[in-house]
Image (cartoon, grey):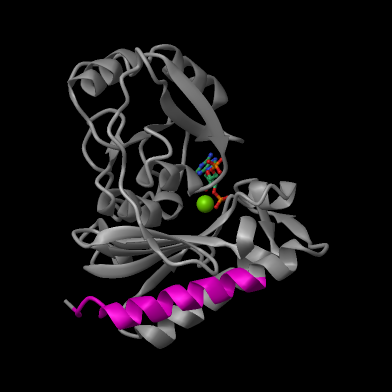
Amino acid sequence: MTQRPKPQRLDAIRAGVESAGREVVTIYRRDFDIQTKADDSPLTEADMASHHALVDLLKIQTPQIPVLSEESGEIPYATRGSWARYWLIDPLDGTKEFIKKSGEFTLNVALIENGVPVFGIVHAPALENGGTTWWGQVGEGAWKQIRGEEPQAIRVRALPDPEHEPWKVVGSRSHGAAEFESFCADLPYNERVSMGSSLKLCLVAEGEADLYPRLAPTCEWDTAAAQAVVNAAGGEVLDAHTLEPLRCNQQDSVLNPYFIVCGQRDERWKQALAKALNTQF
Ligand SMILES: Nc1ncnc2c1ncn2[C@@H]1O[C@H](COP(=O)(O)O)[C@@H](OP(=O)(O)O)[C@H]1O
Ligand SMILES: [Mg+2]
């Protein structure tokens, strides 16, 4: 297998992702065309501008590592199934939030090794202060940087005691609202927050939320980069049925199973999840 890119190269890739983010924000601030993809989801000029910028960046920085993008067109499993290491990117995650101008969209870049997201960059270019980036490398640590400020190491938080403080549960603004509400209704005292895109996983990674149940469809490129950040910050992204960590590139389909993102877990967590998911572990 080719070598994992060195830290300096990963820093250069992060700078390149932030530069692609500036192109996206230029489009965000003016009128843009919206098309509809075959699966009925929206596509803007910004999705494609970001796709080209990120693919070009990765081809220059690491020509030996293949790239799979949401906007690449399908690469059959017969080809990608043999990739021991590849880049998995979502050029614009939260396209609906981009169109609604909520600012809650991200550029996601993940390095996958043998199905496991080991390094990820999640960049939200339109958040306050000119954009925020989260990144993490499993086994090394996770960081958050608001543009113009120093990077801060981030870590998931311990679950609060729900007798005194609510568990913070984050959900999508646009997908799976009914399932989210019924999951939360079975949890101990909790507070709900809505957010678009991979930012939900980043909130768990930085200890601003405790759980993100995703009981609605997503694809591997929606989650892989932020999964690496969550793992590097001490949390997990678990299949909602098996409670095993999500893996990429295991089958023809790029759809994820329904999943739960969590920070630090303990016995209370296990009991609460068993009730909310109506299952036994
Ligand atoms: N029916 C479906 N099948 C697969 N993925 C879906 C889906 N409905 C929504 N998604 C994914 O959910 C993502 C948005 O999630 P959220 O609502 O949490 O922001 C979308 O990302 P994109 O915006 O990159 O297309 C899309 O990939
Ligand atoms: Mg997406």
Q: Is residue 203 left or right of residue 240?
A: right
> What predominant SS class does the magenta segment belong to?
helix
264 versus 86 height, above or below: above
Instruction: Please state if 35 lies on the left or on the right of 3 as rendered.
Output: right
Any part of residue 206 in sight: yes
Magenta residue span? 2-23
Q: Which residue is at a point 48% across and 33% down the rendered structure image?
A: 170
Between 241 and 182, the one nearer to me in the picture? 182
Q: State the image coordinates of residue 79 (x, y, percent, origin top left).
A: 31, 68
Nearest the viewer among 220 and 265 is 265
Quarter of the image containing the N terminus? bottom left
Any part of residue 77 in sight: no
Q: From the viewer's side, name the closer residue of 57 and 124.
A: 124
Label tally: 0
The quarter holding residue 61 reads bottom left
Q: Is 9 rendered above or below residue 48?
A: below
Indicate yes or no whether the magenta region holds residue 4.
Answer: yes
Position of residue 153 measured from the top left corner of the image (x, y, whole percent): 33, 57
Q: Residue at x 39, y 12 (%)?
A: 186
Is residue 195 one of those drawn in magenta? Answer: no
Q: Quick one: quadrant of the C terminus?
A: top left
Relative side of 213 to 116, left or right: right
How far across and down, in percent of the image, does residue 235 sit?
27, 43
The answer to whether residue 38 is above or below residue 54 is: above
Residue 258 coordinates in the image, percent (x, y): 38, 34
Which residue shows up at 47% across the image and 77% down it?
Answer: 15
Q: Is residue 252 left or right of residue 44?
A: left
